[in-house]
């Protein structure tokens, strides 16, 4: 095979794939018509390509779809769980839940009178169910209130939230988001204070650490430093040291860090 | 929703509309499965990896950056495959298992078509990277440019490598025929 044939052979794949410009294509066609060797090469390639093409696509086992649907369902459920409360909930949700709570109270009251007439046992059972529902609704009301336009309403909601013995993750997330993003320093402060009560939760502890990292307001910084020291959160040390090194940190914030740090180390 | 492009669907998925992944799954799972089956020659493993590909695509949906969806999903498939291959290398027992399965498959194919068997053997004799390039380009019909995106190379380099691999394959194939 001379040099020319070698070059031709390298172009045969493109020739078969129609990847050549017309002049090159014609040149190869011309060469092929007079070169049995290259013709043979072309035929071999063609045969192999045809065989590849003829190969049937395999179909996976049917349970691949069932498994996919199961996985999708799980992921959707997880997504629902972790959904952070929307920052712009329409105020009417608040009224809707308020009406719901009123209805529950009415139910409890009527259940009370109903239960008085019935035997005591079933009365207590029903009462327990209703109490549970009431607690759930109270959480919902708190969450809607927490998004209220009025800062004082939000403050009130934060104080409500503090009263829960075991708040749901939704409540905690709403509080955390208030602590980070509320426009009013008082709401942020109250949210941070409320969260201190729930510092058993790792999510809460992490959020307090993160808050100190990003908070710009000195009053809030002081509050967070005090909280983090009181809950003995050593992971906050780097942020505190950063505050000390930062020239823009007001001296009274630095003082707070200097007082607090020895208690952590 | 069915007439949205892959990319439009994946953007919706990345915005937490997870149901849209179902359409992408319908469009791609057989192709991905066949790619893996050619690479591993093991139906069970290929099926498992294919499932994992779509799981990872959902898990890492936020990392999808508006590129070509098919390149992205193949990149995921290759990563999982190579993880699997790495861990397989460390487990001799599993290797034996794979070889056993290979033999089993070979016999059943000889009955079907001897020529087809020769091609399969030739493909197995290529090194991992050449084999993958041939599978992607000739069996799966993926264009050079896209293979470049998947493997982190350039279209020109991919083309040269694919052509070389095809010629190698042809030589191996003809030796046995």
Image: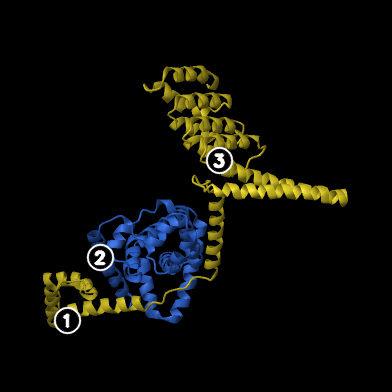
Q: On the picture, is A258 further left or further right than A54?
A: right
Q: Do the residues labelled 2 and 3 touch (CB within 8 Å)?
A: no
* Residue B80 visible in image: no
- Quarter of the image where the N terminus of chain A is located: bottom left
| Residue B147 x %, y % | 31, 61
**Chain coloured blue in this rendering:** B
Q: Few, some or many C-alpha atoms within 10 Å of disc 2 (few <14, some 14-19, many ≥20)?
A: some
Residue visible at 68% across and 44% down in the picture: A135
Q: Which mark is residue A146?
A: 3
Q: Is residue B73 above or below residue A40?
A: above
Q: Is residue A65 above or below residue B113?
A: above
Question: The residue tagged with tag 2: helix, strand or loop?
Answer: helix
Q: Is residue A20 above or below residue A161?
A: below
Q: For residue A17, what is the image quadrant?
A: bottom left
Using the image, name the chain to which the residue with label 2 belongs.
B
Q: Few, some or many C-alpha atoms within 10 Å of disc 3 (few <14, some 14-19, many ≥20)?
A: many
Question: The residue tagged with tag 3: helix, strand or loop?
Answer: helix
Using the image, name the chain to which the residue with label 1 belongs.
A
Question: The residue tagged with tag 1: helix, strand or loop?
Answer: helix
Q: What residue sits right under mark 1 in the picture?
A: A36
Q: What residue sits right under mark 2 in the picture?
A: B164
The colour one sees for chain A in the rendered image is yellow
Residue visible at 42% across and 74% down in the picture: A57
């Amino acid at each position: 095979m001379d040099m020319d044939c070698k070059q031709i052979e390298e172009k045969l794949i493109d020739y078969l794939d129609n990847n050549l410009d017309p002049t090159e294509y014609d040149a190869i066609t011309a060469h092929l018509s007079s070169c049995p060797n290259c013709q043979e090469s072309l035929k071999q390639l063609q045969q192999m390509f045809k065989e590849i093409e003829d190969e049937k696509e395999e179909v996976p086992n049917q349970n691949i779809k069932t498994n996919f649907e199961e996985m999708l369902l799980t992921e959707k459920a997880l997504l629902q769980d972790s959904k952070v409360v929307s920052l712009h909930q329409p105020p009417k949700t608040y009224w809707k839940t308020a009406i719901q709570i009123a209805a529950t109270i009415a139910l409890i009251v009527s259940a009370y009178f109903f239960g008085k007439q019935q035997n005591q046992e079933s009365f207590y059972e029903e009462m327990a169910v209703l109490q549970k529902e009431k607690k759930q609704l109270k959480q919902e009301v708190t969450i809607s209130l927490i998004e209220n336009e009025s800062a004082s309403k939000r403050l009130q909601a934060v104080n409500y939230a503090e009263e829960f013995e075991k708040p749901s993750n939704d409540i905690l997330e709403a509080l955390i988001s208030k602590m980070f993003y509320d426009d009013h320093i008082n709401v942020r402060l109250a949210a941070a204070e409320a969260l201190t009560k729930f510092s058993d939760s790792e999510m809460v502890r992490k959020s307090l650490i993160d808050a100190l990292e990003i908070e710009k307001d000195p009053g809030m910084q002081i509050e967070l430093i005090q909280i983090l020291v009181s809950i003995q959160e050593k992971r906050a040390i780097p942020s505190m040291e950063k505050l000390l090194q930062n020239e823009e940190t007001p001296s009274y914030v630095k003082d707070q860090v200097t007082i607090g740090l020895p208690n952590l180390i | 929703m069915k007439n949205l492009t892959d990319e439009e669907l994946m953007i919706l998925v990345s915005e937490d509309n997870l149901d849209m992944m179902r359409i992408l799954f319908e469009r791609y799972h057989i192709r991905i499965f066949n790619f893996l089956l050619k690479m591993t020659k093991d139906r069970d493993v290929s099926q498992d990896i294919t499932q994992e590909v779509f799981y990872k695509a959902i898990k890492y949906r936020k990392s999808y950056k508006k590129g070509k969806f098919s390149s992205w999903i193949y990149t995921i498939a290759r990563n999982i495959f190579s993880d699997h291959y790495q861990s397989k290398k460390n487990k001799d027992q599993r290797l034996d298992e794979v070889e056993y399965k290979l033999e089993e498959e070979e016999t059943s194919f000889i009955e079907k078509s001897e020529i087809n068997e020769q091609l399969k053997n030739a493909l197995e004799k290529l090194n991992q990277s050449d084999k993958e390039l041939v599978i992607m380009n000739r069996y799966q019909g993926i264009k050079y440019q896209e293979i470049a995106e998947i493997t982190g190379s350039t279209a020109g380099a991919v083309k040269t490598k694919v052509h070389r691999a095809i010629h190698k394959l042809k030589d191996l194939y003809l030796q046995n025929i």
